[in-house]
Structure formats: C-alpha cells, structure tokens
Image (cartoon, grey):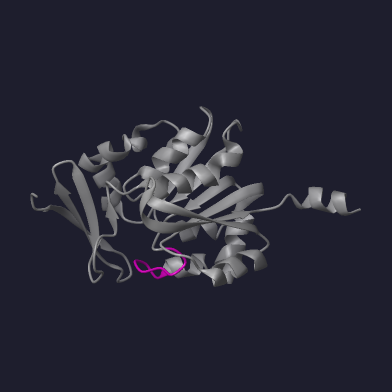
Amino acid sequence: MKALNKLATAIIPNNGGELTLFRREDEFSIRLSGVRGELMNSRVFNSEQELAKLGCAHIKDQDKAEVLVGGLGMGYTLASALECVTAHSRVTVAELIPEVVEWNQGPLGACAGHPLHDPRCQVRLGDIVDLIKLEQPDFDAILLDVDNGPEGITHSNNNWLYSARGLEALYNSLRPEGMLAVWSAGADSMFVIQLKKAGFKVEVRTVRGRPGKGSRHTIFLAKKPWRSSQLAASV
C-alpha cells in the first residue's frame, strides 16, 4: 500500500490544534494533532450522509426550505443535504477554518461531487456559534457535524452548542417542526435528557460508518414541536 502524502495543514482557532490533509491516490485523510487515528477519511462517509438524510427527511418536498450545516468536513453532509431538498431551497454551510473550504474547492472537492459548486449552497465562513446566538427562526433543519459529537475535541466553543444555553439557542433558530440533527461518534444518554429539557422531541438512530459495516455512530434527531398545534389539540 502506498504511503499517505501530506498536502496541507491548517490551524484551528483558540488553541484547537492543527489539522493535516493527506492523500493516497484517490483517498484523502484529515488528522488532528494530539489525537490518535483519523478525524475523517474520504472512504468512510455513510454516517455523514445519513445525518443529512434523517435531518432533512421532513422537508424533501418543501419549497424554499432553509438548511444549516455546521461543519464542512469533506463535504459529504453538505452534498447529501443538497440531494434531499428541492430546487428552490438553500443550504448554508458554516465552516470555521478557511483552509477546509479551500481544500473542498480544490482536490478534496471531487470526493463528494463538488457540492460547493451547487448554486443552492451558501458558505458562511466563521463560527456557527455566532450564527446560532442570533436565535432567529430561519431554518427548517440544522445539521451539526462540527466535532466528535456532544463532547467536542477540536474547538472549545463547540461545547457551548451542546450546553443548555446552546440547545436553547438552537431551538430558537428552528422554525416550528424544524429538525436538529447531531452527529456523534457514540451514544450519550445525558445529551438526550438535555435535548428533551430544551423542548425537543428526541429520537436516536445508530448508523454505520460504511453501508452495513464499519464503526457505529449515533445520530440524535431533535424535533421542535409546533406548539400552537399542540395547544389546540389539548383544548
């Protein structure tokens, strides 16, 4: 097997470490300094696709849906989200690290089919936390794949997203019956409790890193209820 060749590096803000992009023929790998193993690999992306499919299932026929993707990564979640929505919808991807956008605009982009070229895609360069803190109900779906899950390892601000205050802000950023979908490397029963306390109806799915095989990852599906409908039903 040929060795991985180092292509580029990027510094994660606020002492988050260093990302390194490697390539072996048509295979790409992203690794994080201080963490054993790979952070991402271009051959293992099924759970990222499932994150988008599950998180956007309720809007597949909705015209002018608005989706927010937290974390560009290798582009698989973004590409799958674009496949799930209609021609007049929009998918905004928030990415903290400029170099990751550049990698996806370059050789890495072919892996997911160059989703950044889709006219429905809008890139917001910066911390998704700043966008969520606005608490404006602009989105029908929010797909979070910004870290290792509720326990962040690459950026300290990610921990705020999964705190009680962060979940409240995420709730307020969704339209009624909007869906928050969170990718995680593993299960987390306490996070389910936190989601429910924030007002979400929660469902947990287990998906594989590759179709039918590979590591088991967790997708938290948290739906914002249509409160006026619930109130009407209870009268």
**Percent x, y of residue 10:** 23, 58
Magenta highlight: main SS: loop
**In terms of depth relative to the viewer, which is nearer, 117 or 196?**
196
Q: Is residue 12 magenta?
A: no
Q: Is residue 24 above or below residue 64?
A: below
Residue that appears at 41% across and 30% down? 119
Most foreground residue, 70 or 132: 70
Residue 224 in the figure: left or right of residue 103? right
> Is residue 215 in view from this perspective?
yes
Q: Is residue 123 visible?
A: no
Residue, far right: 235
User: Where in the figure is residue 75, as x and y percent of width and height?
Assistant: 35, 44
Front one among 234 and 155: 234
Position above or below: 161 against 26? below
Residue positioned 87% across, 54% down in the render: 234
Task: Left or right? Give the position of 154 relative to 198.
Answer: left
Q: Position of residue 85 (x, y in %)?
A: 52, 34
Outermost front residue: 212
Q: Is residue 216 left or right of residue 221?
A: left
The single residue placed furthest to the left in the displayed view is 2
Q: Residue at x 59, y 61 (%)?
A: 169
Number of marks: 0
Q: Which residues are magenta?
A: 149-156
Across and down, in percent, residue 50 comes to 46, 46
The residue under the point 49% across, 69% down is 160
